[in-house]
Image (spheres, rainbow, N blue to C red):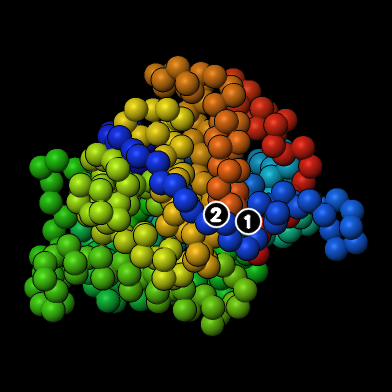
Amino acid sequence: MGRLSRRAFAAAALATLAPVRGAASEPGGPTERRGLVSARGGPRAPTEMRGVWLATVDNRDWPSRTGLSAAEQRAELIAHLDRAVRDRLNTVIFQVRPTADALWPSPFEPWSGFLTGTQGTAPGWDPLGTAVTEAHARGLRLHAWFNPYRIANHADPTRLSAAHPARVHPEWVVRYGGRLFYNPGLPEVRAFVQDAMLDAVAKYPVDAVHFDDYFYPYPLAGQTFDDDAAFDKYGAAFANRAAWRRDNIDKLVTEIAARIRKLRPGTRFGISPFGVWRNASNDPLGSDTRALVQTYDDLHADTRRWVREHWIDYVVPQIYWHIGFADADYARLVDWWAQVANGTQTRLYVGEALYKAGAAGQPSAWQDPVELSRHLTLAAGHPQVRGHVFFAARDVAKDPVGAMARVIADHYGQPATAPR
């Protein structure tokens, strides 16, 4: 998701969590998910999210390396879609704007360098257009995944293509942590990134627009995100800089949601945040955690508000810890998110850390191929949980300890219809 960087923060988030009890059932819960009977009285396929992220940043999942021919890139992409069908998944969340670039012919931003190795060089085909067509032909939903503000995973503007907007408008750019970011505090930046992303929505019948966990960048010790000039110009009405920054991100979310509805009615809008909104020590509405990273305070993303006020159609919190983990128990965080989603119109799916299964250096729980299956069993007890999304496609394919195979055997015995 650029998730390689996020993992370090996820690993650092410390928590002791108390379970949330008493969440009431809601319409469309277990019966919808399990699909017990059809209108004609016979069995029908369940309705639930069974998703997989397909990351392109740094060639994480696809393409396997830069410089492949168009035919080779297309073959690899189709293989990921075919794998999703074989595994009885129903949704692919395809990263199409990883670093202020594009995996479709965009009038706003250059072709992604993760395709050819050179930013701005056309790959000779249309990856997003192909992905939408081929996914739909296989009965899969295709969610277009965008990163709003990340420009580059380096800090040298001269490495960007000559006509890159960040070079044309250097005043839009903030260097932070050895990387380049657009400044979320500038209204012209917010308008531009929306225009750039919505170009894809206008051109292709994508089923959803998807953001991951990156808004303001994750905090780094001893480093400051320099938005002083923007705060001086636009922040006078706010109690402090943090409140102004949250308002900037709130505006991004509400504005793009409204524009999606107008541009392509029926296209959904979902966000996959880091799994901790706030610690209860800071806010009684927060989870009983001691996380070092909180989306509200550190990324200036009020993810709980977005769910409660139905600014987004779905949320996929990245609950990337195992059941019983003393500092951040998966079970207790699912409880907390279920309570947040209860009674709202925002669908709750759970982001699953498939990449940890069998990975070197992970706790023993992640060496057990049954751990991930246990997550789905536990979550099924919460009617608010409408499905799961797995990070990520490369790990679905490799499945080193058989964790995904166990999920399929235990939970995905028949196909499921993706929620609308």
Furthest-front residue in this view = 22
Reading the image, the residue beneath label 1 is 29
**Is residue 341 placed above or below 280 in the rendered structure?**
below
Residue 183 lies in what quarter of the image?
Answer: bottom left
For label 1, the SS is loop
The location of residue 20, given as percent across then percent down, is 41, 46
Residue drawn at x 45%, y 17% as measured from the top left: 364
Residue 125 lies in what quarter of the image?
Answer: bottom right
Which numbered dot is residue 384? 2
For label 2, the SS is loop
| Mark 1 neighbour density, 10 Å: few (under 14) some (14–19) many (20 or more) | some
Name the quarter where the C terminus is drawn.
bottom right
Q: Amino acid at mark 1?
A: Gly
Query: Is residue 252 or residue 335 the one in the foreground?
Result: 335
Instruction: State whether residue 2 appears in this view.
Output: no
The mark total stands at: 2
**Is residue 345 placed above or below 75 in the rendered structure?**
below
Residue 296 lies in what quarter of the image?
Answer: bottom left
Q: CA distance from mark 2 to mark 1?
A: 6 Å
The location of residue 349, given as percent across then percent down, is 54, 51
Q: Amino acid at mark 2?
A: Gln
Residue drawn at x 14%, y 74% as measured from the top left: 238
Query: Is residue 382 or residue 360 the one in the foreground?
Result: 382
